[in-house]
Image (cartoon, rainbow, N blue to C red):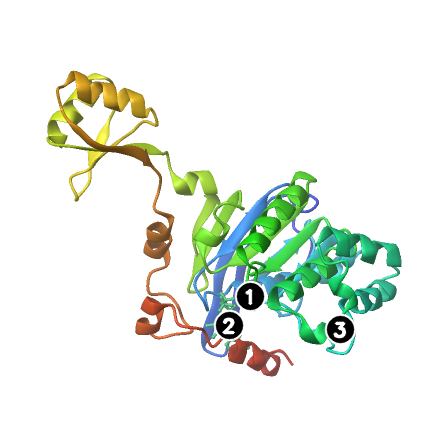
Amino acid sequence: MTATTGTRDGQIRIQGLTKRFGDFTAVDDLSFDVEPGRITGFLGPNGAGKTTTLRMLLGLVRPTSGTATIGGRDYAQLPHPLGTVGAALEATNFHPGRSGRDHLLVLADTASIPAARVDELLELTGIPAAARKRAGGYSMGMRQRLGLAAALLGDPEVLVLDEPANGLDPEGIRWLRGFLKHLASQGKTILVSSHLLQEVAQTVDDVVIIANGRLVRAGTMADLEGTPGALVRTSDPEALAGALRVADVTSTLQDDGALVADTTDLRLVGDVALRAGLPVYGLQPQRADLEQLYFSLTEGTNRNLGDAAVAVGAPTERDAVIGEEGADER
Ligand SMILES: Nc1ncnc2c1ncn2[C@@H]1O[C@H](COP(=O)(O)OP(=O)(O)OP(=O)(O)O)[C@@H](O)[C@H]1O
């Protein structure tokens, strides 16, 4: 593959990317861009093809067709891979007898990165003391932080993180959010996968949603959430809709009888109702129901599980699947 034209430094460009395993198409003609200085959520149900896409981007799996480039180059063509892209694909199992710090020191040494950088990153990821203990007893959250520190060793302009919030407690998720926002504010390109839109909704600027290996939505989080409105309940919603129209506010009647006015000005809606002599039983800001929206975009597309399992969110067979990967890639 050759360099793609029209891409900027640090921009990820996925174009017509396809991966077939035998008869099975895991990633199907996928195209999207990921921009520097922004956090992009890469979303899809279990088995949608996120990890396979990330592995192609990182040169770990060969695409059947299409390209996945960073700053216009394939991973294999990057002159300084560690300084260009850092990745944490899954919470790695570190050598149990070695400390996390020693693990990073080995990685740093092979890339001629000074040891001081390791300690700097352990501070940044909040594990300076814990990382001196044997990795055998590390929690999932601890392994996630260590994986993040490893990804940042070469101070890369692009960061690719597969389900980084897995295993983090609420405080850890909050910390991760702030940390990623800080890195994005430095101009880094950050691609974060998750199978839950709500988990990343407060973190990401952009979203790329895939299902069955295909793109179903790409855009800003703000666009996905839509324009916020005001949800109002009254005795005669039709009459209130008419009164709002006179005040230049359009509204939509929901199935449950509530009216959603196309404005964030709750006071205006209350005043209009008062002037129309209508009682207000409830008045609140209305935002998109992200869970419902995400479900409607990806409904029934979990390819790792049967339909019943999708409905109850049962654990996945991903580990077994990933274990098989080597066979195909030899
Ligand atoms: N080596 C392989 N051989 C055969 N099928 C594979 C292989 N690797 C992945 N798959 C299939 O490709 C699909 C996509 O898997 P992938 O791990 O990329 O999904 P994902 O979106 O990352 O899901 P998860 O959230 O569970 O990690 C899965 O349904 C899986 O069964």
Q: Quadrant of residue 44?
A: bottom left
Ligand 1 contact, mark 1 (Cβ < 8 Å): yes
Q: For the C terminus, which image quadrant?
A: bottom right
Q: Quadrant of residue 91?
A: bottom right
Measured Cα–Cα span from mark 2 to mark 1: 14 Å
Residue behind mark 3 = 134
- Vertical arrangement, residue 185 with respect to residue 169, above or below: above
Residue at image location 61% in from the left, 67% down from the top: 140
- Vertical arrangement, residue 3 with respect to residue 60, above or below: above
* Residue 256 coordinates in the image, percent (x, y): 17, 44
- Vertical arrangement, residue 278 with respect to residue 212, above or below: above
Badge 1: few (under 14), some or many (20 or more) residues near its Cα, within 10 Å? many
Residue behind mark 2 = 20
* Residue 74 visible (yes or no): no
Upstream in the sequence, badge 2 or badge 1? 2
* Residue 29 coordinates in the image, percent (x, y): 48, 60
Number of dots carrying numbers = 3
Relative depth, front residue between 1 and 232: 232
- Report whether 84 appears left or right of 291: right
- Report whether 60 appears left or right of 116: left
Measured Cα–Cα span from mark 3 to mark 2: 40 Å
Q: Amino acid at mark 3?
A: Arg
